[in-house]
Amino acid sequence: MQRDELASRQSGLEQQIEASKSRRAELERRMYGGQVTAPRELQAMDDEVKHLMRHIAELEDREIEVMEALEPLDAELETAERERVALEEAAMRLREAIALSEASLSADLAVQSEERDGAAGDVPRELLVRYEQLRKKLGGTGAARLIGGSCGGCHLALPSMEVDRIRKALPDAVITCDQCGRILVR
């Protein structure tokens, strides 16, 4: 904002300087061109030329002040531009790394989905449907390991009578946690 204001002031001063120089050149051309012969008119033109020269000097001094004020702002702007370019390059590298990671993860996910589908082929259909419902309901985990007397999903201890019943159940029986409803894997 400040830089724009100073640049605008500098541009305005340059226009005033050019206009004053053009006017001075026109007056000098008329004075020395022999078109004006009246001494009073020549004197008035000479006075105006002197006034224009002082005015031009003042404008040029003000322009130098503006240019000096612009210098540190331009240097700061240049530094910021270099930082912006460096950040854009870093962002591009990071986007490329993300794209590579996404591609790798997608490939891994495809392989694991194939393996999962292959393993799920041996599971009875109603058990698979039940597992998927539990997985959606319980945040991605539809089955959990029974560790000691606790459910590996909710980490709550099951009553000792329930643990005893689970141990005596047939190996292919489907057992669920009384607390969270997950299918327990023994």
Image (spheres, rainbow, N blue to C red):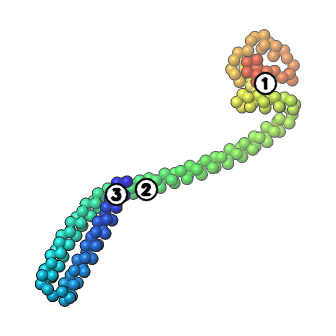
Residue 95 visible to an observer of this rendering: yes
- The numbered disc on residue 183 is 1
Q: Quadrant of residue 39?
A: bottom left
Tell me if residue 146 comes above or below residue 6 in the rendering: above
Precedes in sequence: disc 2 or disc 1: 2
Q: Quadrant of the C terminus?
A: top right
Precedes in sequence: disc 3 or disc 2: 3
Q: Is residue 25 left or right of residue 148?
A: left
Residue where numbered disc 3 is placed: 5
Tell me if residue 34 comes above or below residue 170 in the rendering: below
Task: State the separation of the CA atoms marked 3 and 2.
Answer: 19 Å
In this rendered view, identify the residue nearer to me: 87 or 32. 32
Q: Position of residue 68 (x, y in %)?
A: 27, 59
Mark 3–mark 1 CB contact (< 8 Å): no
Q: Quadrant of the N terminus?
A: bottom left
- The numbered disc on residue 142 is none
Task: State the separation of the CA atoms marked 3 and 1.
Answer: 72 Å
Q: Position of residue 67 (x, y in %)?
A: 29, 61
